[in-house]
Protein backbone atom coordinates (compact mmCIF):
# COMPACT_ATOMS: atom_id res chain seq x y z
CA UNK A 1 0.00 0.00 0.00
CA UNK A 2 1.71 3.16 -1.23
CA UNK A 3 0.36 6.60 -0.41
CA UNK A 4 2.48 8.07 -3.19
CA UNK A 5 0.92 5.65 -5.68
CA UNK A 6 -2.58 6.57 -4.51
CA UNK A 7 -1.77 10.25 -4.96
CA UNK A 8 -0.45 9.52 -8.45
CA UNK A 9 -3.64 7.69 -9.42
CA UNK A 10 -5.88 10.44 -7.98
CA UNK A 11 -3.85 13.32 -9.44
CA UNK A 12 -5.94 15.49 -11.74
CA UNK A 13 -2.87 15.97 -13.92
CA UNK A 14 -2.87 12.29 -14.89
CA UNK A 15 -3.24 12.31 -18.71
CA UNK A 16 -6.57 10.50 -18.69
CA UNK A 17 -8.78 13.19 -20.23
CA UNK A 18 -10.63 14.06 -17.05
CA UNK A 19 -10.07 17.78 -17.64
CA UNK A 20 -12.40 17.56 -20.66
CA UNK A 21 -15.41 16.58 -18.54
CA UNK A 22 -17.46 18.60 -16.04
CA UNK A 23 -19.41 15.62 -14.61
CA UNK A 24 -22.69 17.28 -15.54
CA UNK A 25 -21.85 20.68 -14.08
CA UNK A 26 -21.85 22.59 -17.37
CA UNK A 27 -25.51 21.78 -18.01
CA UNK A 28 -26.47 22.79 -14.47
CA UNK A 29 -24.58 26.09 -14.79
CA UNK A 30 -26.40 26.81 -18.06
CA UNK A 31 -29.73 26.06 -16.36
CA UNK A 32 -28.90 28.57 -13.62
CA UNK A 33 -28.81 25.99 -10.85
CA UNK A 34 -25.13 26.55 -9.98
CA UNK A 35 -24.00 30.16 -9.85
CA UNK A 36 -21.55 30.51 -6.97
CA UNK A 37 -19.47 28.59 -4.45
CA UNK A 38 -22.46 27.90 -2.22
CA UNK A 39 -24.38 26.38 -5.13
CA UNK A 40 -21.31 24.39 -6.10
CA UNK A 41 -21.18 22.97 -2.58
CA UNK A 42 -24.73 21.68 -2.92
CA UNK A 43 -23.95 20.19 -6.31
CA UNK A 44 -20.84 18.42 -5.03
CA UNK A 45 -22.57 17.04 -1.94
CA UNK A 46 -25.35 15.62 -4.08
CA UNK A 47 -22.91 14.24 -6.62
CA UNK A 48 -20.83 12.57 -3.90
CA UNK A 49 -23.86 10.96 -2.24
CA UNK A 50 -25.15 9.52 -5.52
CA UNK A 51 -22.72 9.02 -8.39
CA UNK A 52 -19.75 9.27 -6.05
CA UNK A 53 -20.99 6.42 -3.88
CA UNK A 54 -21.69 4.25 -6.93
CA UNK A 55 -18.31 5.02 -8.52
CA UNK A 56 -16.44 4.36 -5.28
CA UNK A 57 -18.23 1.05 -4.70
CA UNK A 58 -17.58 -0.21 -8.22
CA UNK A 59 -13.96 0.93 -8.17
CA UNK A 60 -13.42 -0.90 -4.88
CA UNK A 61 -15.13 -4.04 -6.22
CA UNK A 62 -13.06 -3.94 -9.43
CA UNK A 63 -9.91 -3.62 -7.36
CA UNK A 64 -10.80 -6.51 -5.06
CA UNK A 65 -11.89 -9.01 -7.73
CA UNK A 66 -10.45 -8.61 -11.24
CA UNK A 67 -12.47 -11.62 -12.43
CA UNK A 68 -15.64 -9.56 -11.93
CA UNK A 69 -14.71 -6.73 -14.30
CA UNK A 70 -17.15 -7.68 -17.07
CA UNK A 71 -19.97 -8.20 -14.58
CA UNK A 72 -19.24 -4.88 -12.87
CA UNK A 73 -19.13 -3.11 -16.22
CA UNK A 74 -22.59 -4.44 -17.05
CA UNK A 75 -23.79 -3.36 -13.61
CA UNK A 76 -22.70 0.20 -14.29
CA UNK A 77 -24.48 0.16 -17.63
CA UNK A 78 -27.68 -0.74 -15.78
CA UNK A 79 -27.14 2.12 -13.32
CA UNK A 80 -26.50 4.73 -16.03
CA UNK A 81 -29.78 5.39 -17.86
CA UNK A 82 -28.38 8.28 -19.91
CA UNK A 83 -26.66 7.15 -23.14
CA UNK A 84 -24.60 10.35 -23.07
CA UNK A 85 -23.30 9.54 -19.59
CA UNK A 86 -22.53 5.97 -20.58
CA UNK A 87 -20.48 7.24 -23.51
CA UNK A 88 -18.68 9.75 -21.30
CA UNK A 89 -17.87 7.12 -18.66
CA UNK A 90 -16.49 4.71 -21.25
CA UNK A 91 -14.47 7.44 -22.96
CA UNK A 92 -12.90 8.33 -19.63
CA UNK A 93 -12.35 4.67 -18.82
CA UNK A 94 -10.56 4.12 -22.11
CA UNK A 95 -8.33 7.15 -21.59
CA UNK A 96 -7.60 6.21 -17.98
CA UNK A 97 -6.69 2.67 -19.01
CA UNK A 98 -4.29 4.00 -21.64
CA UNK A 99 -2.56 6.21 -19.07
CA UNK A 100 -2.47 3.42 -16.49
CA UNK A 101 -0.96 0.89 -18.84
CA UNK A 102 1.97 3.21 -19.35
CA UNK A 103 2.71 2.83 -15.63
CA UNK A 104 1.54 -0.63 -14.57
CA UNK A 105 0.79 -4.05 -16.06
CA UNK A 106 -2.99 -4.19 -16.33
CA UNK A 107 -4.79 -7.34 -17.48
CA UNK A 108 -8.25 -8.86 -17.48
CA UNK A 109 -10.22 -5.81 -18.60
CA UNK A 110 -11.88 -4.83 -21.87
CA UNK A 111 -10.85 -2.06 -24.25
CA UNK A 112 -13.48 0.47 -23.18
CA UNK A 113 -14.58 -0.11 -19.57
CA UNK A 114 -16.57 2.32 -17.49
CA UNK A 115 -14.31 4.75 -15.66
CA UNK A 116 -14.82 3.29 -12.14
CA UNK A 117 -14.01 -0.23 -13.37
CA UNK A 118 -10.87 1.03 -15.10
CA UNK A 119 -9.90 2.90 -11.93
CA UNK A 120 -10.32 -0.21 -9.80
CA UNK A 121 -8.31 -2.30 -12.26
CA UNK A 122 -5.47 0.21 -12.21
CA UNK A 123 -5.56 0.39 -8.42
CA UNK A 124 -5.18 -3.39 -8.22
CA UNK A 125 -2.33 -3.35 -10.76
CA UNK A 126 -0.61 -0.65 -8.74
CA UNK A 127 -0.85 -2.69 -5.53
CA UNK A 128 -3.49 -0.51 -3.88
CA UNK A 129 -6.36 -1.75 -1.73
CA UNK A 130 -10.10 -1.57 -2.48
CA UNK A 131 -10.39 1.13 0.20
CA UNK A 132 -7.77 3.22 -1.58
CA UNK A 133 -9.51 2.70 -4.92
CA UNK A 134 -12.72 3.95 -3.32
CA UNK A 135 -10.96 7.05 -2.00
CA UNK A 136 -9.56 7.82 -5.45
CA UNK A 137 -13.02 7.44 -7.02
CA UNK A 138 -14.80 9.58 -4.43
CA UNK A 139 -12.06 12.20 -4.60
CA UNK A 140 -12.40 12.42 -8.38
CA UNK A 141 -16.15 12.88 -8.06
CA UNK A 142 -15.46 16.12 -6.20
CA UNK A 143 -12.35 17.52 -7.81
CA UNK A 144 -13.39 17.08 -11.45
CA UNK A 145 -16.49 19.31 -11.33
CA UNK A 146 -14.81 21.66 -8.85
CA UNK A 147 -12.07 22.35 -11.38
CA UNK A 148 -14.68 22.76 -14.11
CA UNK A 149 -16.54 25.29 -11.94
CA UNK A 150 -13.51 27.56 -11.83
CA UNK A 151 -13.42 27.59 -15.63
CA UNK A 152 -17.16 27.87 -16.17
CA UNK A 153 -17.98 30.47 -13.55
CA UNK A 154 -14.67 32.20 -12.90
CA UNK A 155 -14.88 31.26 -9.23
CA UNK A 156 -12.07 32.06 -6.83
CA UNK A 157 -9.91 28.89 -6.84
CA UNK A 158 -8.97 29.47 -3.21
CA UNK A 159 -12.64 29.48 -2.20
CA UNK A 160 -13.27 26.34 -4.27
CA UNK A 161 -10.40 24.51 -2.61
CA UNK A 162 -11.61 25.65 0.81
CA UNK A 163 -14.91 24.01 -0.11
CA UNK A 164 -13.11 20.80 -1.10
CA UNK A 165 -11.30 20.81 2.25
CA UNK A 166 -14.63 21.04 4.06
CA UNK A 167 -15.96 18.14 2.01
CA UNK A 168 -12.96 15.90 2.70
CA UNK A 169 -14.59 14.16 5.72
CA UNK A 170 -17.67 13.40 3.59
CA UNK A 171 -15.40 12.01 0.89
CA UNK A 172 -13.71 9.72 3.41
CA UNK A 173 -17.07 8.58 4.79
CA UNK A 174 -18.49 7.75 1.36
CA UNK A 175 -15.30 5.92 0.38
CA UNK A 176 -15.31 3.85 3.56
CA UNK A 177 -18.97 2.92 3.10
CA UNK A 178 -18.32 1.94 -0.52
CA UNK A 179 -15.22 -0.11 0.27
CA UNK A 180 -17.07 -2.05 2.96
CA UNK A 181 -19.37 -3.38 0.25
CA UNK A 182 -16.72 -4.30 -2.30
CA UNK A 183 -17.45 -8.00 -1.96
CA UNK A 184 -21.21 -7.68 -2.40
CA UNK A 185 -22.93 -9.19 -5.46
CA UNK A 186 -23.16 -6.68 -8.29
CA UNK A 187 -26.93 -6.39 -7.94
CA UNK A 188 -26.50 -5.42 -4.27
CA UNK A 189 -23.95 -2.66 -4.86
CA UNK A 190 -25.17 0.96 -4.52
CA UNK A 191 -27.47 2.18 -7.27
CA UNK A 192 -28.12 5.79 -6.20
CA UNK A 193 -29.14 7.95 -9.15
CA UNK A 194 -29.45 11.63 -10.05
CA UNK A 195 -32.22 11.96 -12.68
CA UNK A 196 -31.61 15.69 -13.17
CA UNK A 197 -28.03 14.96 -14.20
CA UNK A 198 -29.24 12.27 -16.62
CA UNK A 199 -31.65 14.73 -18.24
CA UNK A 200 -29.01 17.47 -18.30
CA UNK A 201 -26.51 15.14 -19.94
CA UNK A 202 -28.90 14.36 -22.78
CA UNK A 203 -29.55 18.06 -23.40
CA UNK A 204 -25.84 18.86 -23.14
CA UNK A 205 -25.00 16.25 -25.78
CA UNK A 206 -27.08 18.20 -28.33
CA UNK A 207 -25.30 21.52 -27.87
CA UNK A 208 -23.32 22.74 -30.84
CA UNK A 209 -21.02 24.82 -28.63
CA UNK A 210 -19.83 23.62 -25.24
CA UNK A 211 -16.69 23.84 -23.15
CA UNK A 212 -16.75 20.26 -21.83
CA UNK A 213 -17.49 16.89 -23.38
CA UNK A 214 -19.91 16.07 -20.57
Image: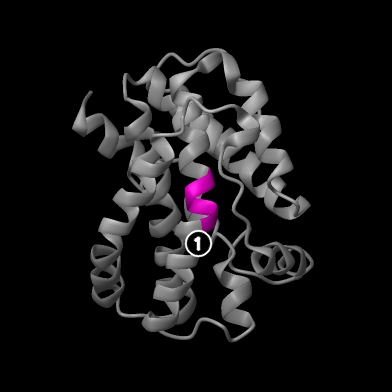
Write down the region rendered in magenta.
50-54
**Residue sitting nearer the eye, 56 or 7:** 56
Disc 1: which residue? 47
Query: Is 158 on the left or on the right of 173, as rendered?
Result: left
| Quadrant where the image shows the C terminus | bottom right
Q: Is residue 148 visible?
A: no
Report the residue that reaches farthest toward the left: 3
Q: Quadrant of residue 73?
A: top right
Q: Where's residue 74, x and y in %?
A: 71, 31
**Can you give x and y, in whole percent of width and height, for residue 70 in the image?**
66, 22
At x 39% / y 74%, what residue is drawn? 41
Q: Nearer the viewer, residue 144 or 16?
A: 144
Left or right, 35 with respect to 186, comes to left
**Which residue occupies 60% across, 35% down?**
188
Question: Of helix, strand and loop, which one carries label 1?
Answer: helix
- Residue 73 visible (yes or no): yes
Q: Position of residue 143 (x, y in %)?
A: 38, 58
Residue 204 rendering spot, x and y as whole percentages: 71, 68
Q: Residue at x 26, y 57 (%)?
A: 169
Amino acid sequence: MSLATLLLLADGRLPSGGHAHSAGLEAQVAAGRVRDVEDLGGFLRGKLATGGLVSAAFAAAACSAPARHAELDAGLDARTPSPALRRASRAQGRALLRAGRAMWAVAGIGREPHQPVALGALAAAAGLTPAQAAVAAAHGTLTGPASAAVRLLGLDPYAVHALLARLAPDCDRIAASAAARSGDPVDDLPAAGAPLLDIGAEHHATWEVRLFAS
